[in-house]
Amino acid sequence: MDLVKAARRGREAALLQLFDDHHLPLFRFAYRLTGSVADAEDIVQECFLQLLRPECAFDPRRTSVRTYLFGVVRNQSLKRMRNSGLADEACHHAKQDSSPEDEASRAELEDAVARAVKQLPDTQREVLILAHYERLRLAEIARVMALELGAVKSRLQRARASLKETLAAYMPGWERSLEKKP
Amino acid sequence: MNDTELDEILDTWTVPPPPTSLRESVRAGFAAGQHRWIGARPPRPRKSLVAAAVFGAVAVLLVVAQAHPGSPPVRIPYTVDSEFVRYAVDGSSSIDMYATSYEIDGAEILTSRSIPNRPFGTALGRTLDAALPIWSRLMARLTIDPETLRRVRQAAHRSVGVVAGCNASCLTLEHYGFARAAAGPNTGCIDGTIVGHETILNYPTTAVQPRMGGNVRMTWWMAPDLGCFALRIATEKKRPDGTWRLVSEKRALRVRLNPSQTRTE
């Protein structure tokens, strides 16, 4: 019996197995979209419980459970960001001026990358996170986002081109500048 | 910057590990939702004979429940009279239901309830209150293996359940359950964010907002002295502009300690 069916029939062990198999990438994805541990935690919890509800549209003949869960996390994250205005806040931070010299530490560089990714348009950001950080195949990303494969490819290319431009200032010798720090 | 350099710089963005409570939250949410999910998905009987037997049993239960409404199975430590209020968008309110209940083993047990100005609805509601749990247990026995049932019952003891309102013109009750908080002086009976302290009907309560997500927020005012009975429950929904609107409320009106002590506001 597959795990989703078993969990829906009341087997807690099956649900926890699903959780153990999938929660880490889902949490990372939710965190990178919302920028909040608390929101990511809520979203991941909700996505597993949603899988069990009678009205859940998951159909194992059409998609894998991993793809379905990524789709739920994506929708929940976007909903939260719109409601809380996080997207606006992310854009605001991204527009702040700062020089590479001021952000020579690894933490600052990490912050710069996070801001640059958040500055991307929603769909480009999602494609980039799924492709780069979660190593999903483009075809699977297309299913998660309900897009054509070509649209996924072009958005990924645009996202990477945009990031190269945004992060170019941090690139020359960034590793060396880190090594100089105590 | 080439692709490899971009990949390297992107990899500097790390993610904190998920909270260790996440697994337990999912497990508690599963345990709390069991009753509703299983109840909402009754399986097809394997044989028509079984279906007929179940139908007959339910008919008998309905008759028995109507003949003996609300008979308590154990000695009741106290009872709380509550009113359930519903708020419309324009701010007007109406009483959905009055109920008398108590909390035992993490579950709120109703001893009686009435729907104002609807005697037939009250009778039908009481019948369903008595019959639905028996029906649910019967279905669980037929469809769930004993080991899983045992775990579900254990999980129920680790949570606190309440009646927060009613559905379907108040014919059925709206149950909620959340994981019980770890013992301690600053906990609020259930896991969640403590948002205040208040004395209700002379009982100290802790206001807790359990983790729910989505566009619904609940606040429970828990009274540890009454075995974690929720003396007040407020349910709010988020408006499109992000503010919260109160949609329903459960309010305790009187606490009766058996056999003779009574506290009123």
Image (spheres, coloured by chain):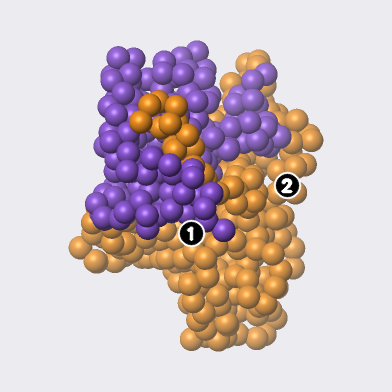
Could you tell me which residue is drawn at 37 percent across and 58 percent down?
A102
Query: Chain drawn orange, letter?
Result: B
Of all chains, the one bearing label 1 is B
The answer to which of marks 2 and 1 sits earlier in the sequence is 2
CB-based contact (under 8 Å), mark 2 and mark 1: no
Question: Which residue of the protein is positioned furthest toward the left in this rendering?
Answer: B90
Q: Chain A's shade in the image? A: purple
Could you tell me which residue is drawn at 34 percent across and 15 percent down?
A149
Would residue A55 be seen by someone viewing this image from the given angle? no
Up/down of B138 relative to B76, above or below: above
Q: Position of residue B137 (x, y in %)?
A: 67, 40
Up/down of A170 relative to A68, above or below: below
Inspect the image, locate mark 2, and give the three-letter code of the amino acid beneath it. Arg
User: Which of these two is toward me, B5 or A133?
Assistant: B5
How many residues crowd mark 1 within 10 Å: few (<14), some (14–19), many (20+)? many
Q: Position of residue B23 (x, y in %)?
A: 64, 45
Would residue A169 be seen by someone viewing this image from the given angle? yes
**Residue on which the image places disc 1:** B164
- For the residues labelled 2 and 1, the Cα–Cα distance comes to 21 Å
Q: Is residue B126 left or right of residue B58?
A: left
**Residue on which the image places disc 2:** B153
Could you tell me which residue is drawn at 57 percent across and 82 percent down?
B204
> Which quadrant would residue B246 be assigned to in this image?
bottom left
Of all chains, the one bearing label 2 is B
Quadrant (top left/top right/bottom left/bottom right) for the N terminus of chain B: top left
Secondary structure found at label 2: helix
Q: Is residue B184 left or right of residue B232?
A: right
Inspect the image, locate mark 1, and give the three-letter code of the amino acid beneath it. Ala
